[in-house]
DNA sequence: CTGAAAGCGCTTACAG
DNA sequence: CTGAAAGCGCTTACAG
């Protein structure tokens, strides 16, 4: 069922029918009624590719994220989809699987006009951002959330990473920790850098040689991380506090403690960035720095749609910073 | 940059360039080389809407799922996206948020040829499947995973739900449970029915009046579920075993036990369907029936692509049944 | 208020 | 092996 057939059924021209369906001021009310009724009766729906081609707009956005089997990202996607559905946009999803090459390939494919805009969170290993620069040069609206690229002037939705990490570290210090390890994820992701700076800054407030800070570089390979954390905790002067910069590292730290029989929080206190809904049910319950993932997704989508539709663009901040929430639980309690 | 411009640069006709880019046998090797080189140099990419319109194919599929902030679904989506990326397909994602009306609206929108095929898992409340029947009538390839509709002849990817529930219930019986509650989710989802049947069938093997079985209807509202489970466990003759038919109910059961101080597994043993990666870190560690979500996603996508491309369609089973794995942990251990 | 016509950017059957 | 032309199904500037 296409416009031509529908027009024939109605004994009207294609142009009149098309205009009636789009509620054009050029068409009489009576004709509109007739056309709408017939379209409904025959279940007519415009071919999206023909419309897109003609209008050079697709009402489609792309979402490019490192992974999906991850509470933070799946909650953020939930927010993005909610706004998109509300605004009548379609969402294409692409996973980079934390691979910079895949990310590049995906972004290159998105340069052909398939989408009106893109929401991204970078792969942990993305250094070269020429593919993103090219998007920007082609005036394809782009919004980052969480893992954003520096050196590119597009809106970014992040959280108060320096402050939340600072506060989390202060919490450990207050609870009596003197030797605290920051489990870093990927040190060229800007949000991880900020978390690290927050940690270091809090440690500096102690200004005392009794205190030790550790920066422990971890990655995406869980078994490698396991070994790193195991070695860390088997040292004679092991840390008595841990700040996990991402969820998977908090979980791996729990695993290690379980395995080598180190008691949390007695022997080591742990706090971590996490969006786990079961953090309070862990053994022991996990003190969490929780990002407002859903809200970040909503915000990213709202800003992208404003960019696409050029509405209120003047009022879009370069950076939107939402606040994480710190929830203190047993993993940081005093004995 | 479009074909016309590219052709002009090359002093060739649009048709020759188009055919060269598509590696047509009609074009000489030398010309192909020339065209490819120029296309690369000028970063030419075909307009997807023009191609789609002309070819009446979009290399795009839709994924319609109840929610995404859920381990089972996000793992399944991961599998689907992996296969899609490998085959060069694009994936549109739509969330029904467990709302049958939204599901209907989404599916209606997908009837206009936007996608070559659809992978779905039904909302918990979908009863009327006329919208799905219509897809089928329009010959839009459709594949279900997990929550499938009966009465519609399309491929389904599910797990051995009767058997896994039967086995889980037998495990509780072996561990000494005599009064077992099956926390049901939505009793008109066929996979939940099968899990319930598996439970009942296992209970019947006891064939003894000392044994009690409970079918406890729950829903998607966590706070309602909480109250239901709380009341269940506050009864004088409360159950000593629980089979949770979905992850969220296992978690809510843990919450209730935590709150009203019922000891797991001493006072009540719990086993549940879950894809939680932290099940082994819960207090106590949770005995799990785990579905191979990623593999289900891969399988669903593979079958859909065969349907779309009409390759090996004759060998596609109506139902593909993968096996869940039962992992026994502390929540079902004997005292 | 209605309709004929051009054109979005491709692909492909056909002619040469 | 190359190119002219039709057409996928829309939208819209323009004529009447």
Image (cartoon, coloured by chain):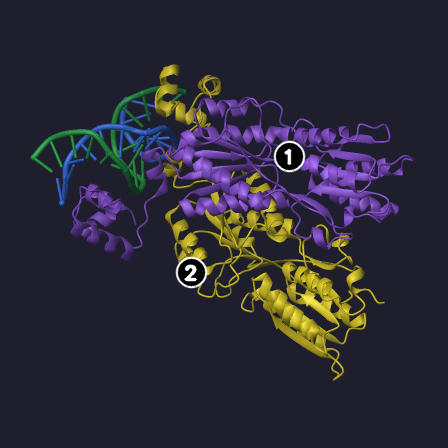
Chain colours: A yellow, B purple, C green, D blue
User: In terms of depth relative to the viewer, which is nearer, B79 or A112?
Assistant: B79
10 Å neighbourhood of mark 1: few (<14), some, or many (≥20)?
many
Report the mark closest to the observer, 2 or 1.
1
> Which residue bears the numbered disc 1?
B161
Say if B296 sits above or below A264 in the image.
above
Residue A194 position in % (x across, y down): 61, 68
Q: Quadrant of residue B251?
A: top right
Say if B102 sits above or below B328 in the image.
above
Identify which residue is drawn at 49% across, 61% down. A153
Q: Quadrant of residue B188?
A: top right
Residue A209 position in % (x across, y down): 74, 84
Say if A80 sits above or below A161 in the image.
above
> Which residue bears the numbered disc 2?
A133
Callout count = 2
Considering the numbered disc 2 on the image, is that residue within a helix, a strand or a loop? helix
Identify which residue is drawn at 67% across, 59% down. A251
Residue A48 visible at all: no
């Amino acid at each position: 069922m296409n416009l031509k057939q529908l027009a024939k059924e109605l004994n009207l021209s294609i142009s009149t029918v098309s205009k009636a369906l789009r509620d054009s001021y050029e068409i009489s009310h009576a004709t509109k009624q007739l056309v709408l009724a017939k379209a409904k009766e025959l279940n007519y729906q415009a071919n999206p590719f023909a419309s897109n081609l003609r209008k050079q707009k697709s009402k489609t956005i792309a979402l490019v994220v490192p992974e999906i089997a991850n509470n933070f990202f799946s909650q953020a996607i939930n927010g993005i989809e909610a706004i998109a559905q509300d605004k009548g946009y379609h969402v294409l999803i692409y996973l980079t699987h934390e691979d910079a090459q895949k990310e590049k390939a995906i972004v290159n494919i998105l340069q052909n006009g398939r989408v009106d805009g893109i929401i991204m969170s970078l792969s942990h290993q993305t250094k070269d951002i020429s593919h993103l620069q090219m998007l920007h040069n082609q005036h394809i609206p782009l919004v980052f959330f969480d893992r954003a690229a520096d050196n590119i002037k597009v809106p970014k939705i992040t959280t108060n990473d320096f402050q939340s990490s600072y506060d989390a570290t202060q919490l450990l210090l207050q609870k009596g920790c003197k030797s605290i390890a920051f489990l870093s994820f990927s040190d060229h992701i800007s949000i991880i850098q900020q978390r690290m700076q927050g940690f270091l800054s809090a440690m500096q407030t102690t200004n005392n040689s009794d205190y030790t800070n550790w920066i422990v570089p971890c990655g995406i390979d869980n078994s490698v991380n396991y070994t790193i954390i195991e070695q860390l905790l088997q040292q004679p002067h092991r840390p008595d506090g841990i700040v996990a910069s991402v969820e998977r590292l908090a979980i791996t730290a729990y695993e290690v403690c379980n395995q080598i029989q180190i008691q949390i929080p007695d022997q080591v206190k742990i706090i971590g960035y996490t969006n786990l809904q079961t953090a309070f049910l862990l053994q022991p319950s996990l003190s969490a720095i929780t990002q407002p993932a859903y809200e970040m997704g909503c915000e990213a989508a709202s800003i992208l749609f404003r960019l696409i539709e050029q509405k209120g663009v003047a009022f879009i901040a370069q950076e939107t910073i939402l606040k994480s929430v710190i929830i203190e639980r047993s993993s940081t309690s005093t004995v």
